[in-house]
Amino acid sequence: MATSKVTITLDNDQLDEVRRLVAAGQASSVSGFVTHAVRVALHDAAGWREMLDEALRDTGGPLTAEERAWADGVLGVKPRRARRTSRRNVA
C-alpha cells in the first residue's frame, strides 16, 4: 500500500497523550496511532453513510431543493458561500 507523508496539527494535550500511549507500548508510534484513528474514523463514516442511505431509501430519497430550503429556514441555517480553490490544488 502506497503512503504519503502529511503534516497535521494536534492540541498539545492530545499529542502528549498519544506519546504516553506510545511510551506505554499501547501504540506502535505516533504515526501508527494516527493511521489507526483515521482508519476507525473512515469505517465509522462509512457506517453512518450506509445508515443514511438506508433511511433515505425508506423515506423517499434525499431532500428536494424546496425541502432543504424550508429546513434551512426553520433551523436558521445561513446559505453557504462558495469556497475558493486552494492554490495548492490548482494545476
Image (cartoon, rainbow, N blue to C red):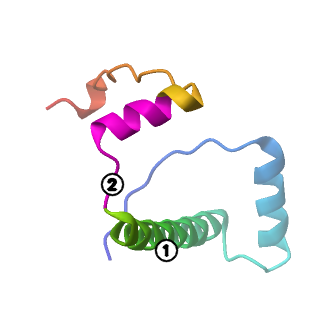
Q: Image quadrant for the C terminus?
A: top left
The 10 Å Cα crowd at callout 1, few under 14, some 14 to 19, many 20 or more, is few
Question: At 79% across and 61% down in the image, what residue appears?
Answer: 19
Query: Residue 61 at x, y = what percent?
Result: 31, 60
The residue sitting at the left extreme is 91
Q: Is residue 79 magenta?
A: no
Question: At 62% across and 41% down in the image, what residue appears?
Answer: 9
Q: How many marks?
A: 2
The main secondary structure of the magenta stretch is helix
Q: Is residue 70 magenta?
A: yes
Instruction: Give SS at disc 1.
Output: helix
Amino acid tagged 1: Gly
Q: Which residue is mark 1?
A: 47
Start-end of magenta stretch:
61-72
Q: Nearer the viewer, residue 82 or 64?
A: 64
Q: Which residue is mark 2?
A: 62
